[in-house]
Image (cartoon, rainbow, N blue to C red):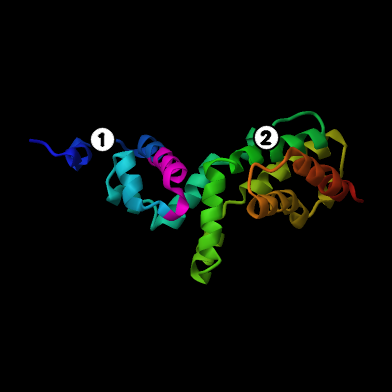
Amino acid sequence: MESAASGTDHRRRPRRRGAALHDAIVQAVVAELAEVGYAGLTMEGVAERAQASKGSLYRRWPGKLQLVMDTAYHLLPEPADVADTGTLRGDLLAMLRLVNDNLAGPAGQAMRGVISEVLQDDTRAAQVRARARGTSVAAVREVVRRADARGEIDGRAVTERQLETGHALLRYHFLSHGGPVADEVVTGIVDEVLLPLFRAR
């Protein structure tokens, strides 16, 4: 008689490679985050849910921290996904609202877990910095480029630190107060901070 565990026997796992396997793993991480949170997530649990071998995970990610980080980046919007509303203010609001929506889901859980872990370990903090992709800054840079092309601002005057400000404030509020962040906070970040910064000459 077959045991209940036979459903996860490696001989019965679907043969997936490349993008199909990666997508299955990402979806498994999302489901695990929703069910057990970052603290309860394990490489073994993800492998079982994705119907993949642990080896297939460890060949791509050295551990849970890197796996969850990459999943969070996969969930966050790409710079090209930011809506072109025709105005700097509209683009900034659309961008931060999109990020806020993502923070309210598995990406936000992932961020909380990763930050809580790296605060206790300088080595892991270095790993996070090394794995960072700069997606957030790239999204703001695209918004600034559009505004510069429309003649709303001088894009050359916008510094890297200014590009980081909006996402940093949104993340701080999310980590301090939970999510989703109230829309009035998002609007305040845009109207009271970003627009004066980007339009300063």
Residue 22 location in percent, x, y? 39, 40
SS state under label 2: loop
Residue at 68 percent across and 49 percent down: it is: 137
SS state under label 1: loop
Range drawn in magenta: 25-39
Residue 58 location in percent, x, y? 34, 54
Q: Residue furthest bottom?
A: 122
Q: Residue furthest left?
A: 1
Q: Residues within 10 Å of mark 2 (few under 14, many from 20)?
A: many
Residue 4 location in percent, x, y? 18, 38
* Residue located beneath label 1 in the image: 15
Asked if the stretch drawn in magenta spans residue 33, the answer is yes
**Residue type for callout 1:** Arg
Q: Is residue 188 visible?
A: yes
Which label was assigned to residue 82?
Answer: 2
**Residue type for callout 2:** Val
Looking at the picture, tell me which residue is in the foreground, 30 or 69. Answer: 30
